[in-house]
Image: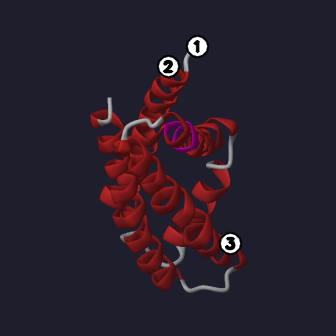
Amino acid sequence: MTGAAVTEVLRVVAAVGCGLVAGLLLAFSGGVMTALARLPGDTGADAMRAINAAVLNPLFLGVFTGSALACLALAVAAVVTGGPGPAIVGAALHLVGAFGVTVAVNVPLNDALAARTLPWERYRTRWTAWNHVRTLAATGATVLLVVAG
């Protein structure tokens, strides 16, 4: 398989992965967090704790981590082979804006919620704002990866 063919396969895999991640993040920004905010008392916080625990499964982690790894491999391959610029930018956007923000912001917020060291309303507001960033980054990455073909 040529370098260009490898880059193309990675681009398609990364685009599908980024699209799946964008869809999941959009579901939270577009409805789940609003629904949890409407629950009485600490019910929303309890539900989010349960979601955060349940999402740590092979399917989610495989898609989420796999899309980041595909983006990383794509960026390297595209730089080495002189691949399309939009693919490099899209991969970087996903790595920084979706995966990076998750690791740097959303996971620590989840940990604080689990430890009960952050009030639900403050958690929900901050988590949701950063989730919007992740959603836009994953969506933008998907678009750039698709148009790079």
Magenta-drawn segment: 74-78
Residue 64 position, x and y percent, is 57, 45
The quadrant in which residue 145 appears is top left
Residue 47 in sight:
no
Q: Nearer the viewer, mark 2 or mark 3?
A: 2
Cβ atoms at labels 1 and 3 below 8 Å apart: no
In this rendering, position of residue 88 left or right of residue 148: right
| The furthest residue to the right | 115
Q: Residue at x 39, y 39 (%)?
A: 19
Q: Which residue is mark 1?
A: 1
Residue 147 in sight:
yes
Predominant secondary structure, magenta span = helix
Q: Nearer the viewer, mark 1 or mark 3?
A: 1
Q: Secondary structure at mark 2?
A: helix
Q: Residue at x 46, y 47 (%)?
A: 91
Q: Return the mark for residue 48.
A: none
Residue 30 within the magenta-colored segment of the rendering = no
Q: Return the mark for residue 111.
A: 3
Nearest to N terminus: mark 2 or mark 3: 2
Q: Pick whichever, 93 or 127, lies toward us.
A: 93
146 is higher (above) or lower (below) than 119: above
Q: Which residue is mark 2?
A: 5
Q: Pick whichever, 114 or 90, lies toward us.
A: 90
Cβ atoms at labels 1 and 2 below 8 Å apart: yes
Instruction: Check disc 1: other Cα within 10 Å, few if <14, some if 14-19, many if 20+.
Output: few
Give, as a three-letter code, the residue at label 3: Asp
| Number of marks in picture | 3
In this rendering, position of residue 147 left or right of residue 124: left
Q: CA distance from mark 1 to mark 2?
A: 6 Å
Residue 44 position, x and y percent, is 49, 69
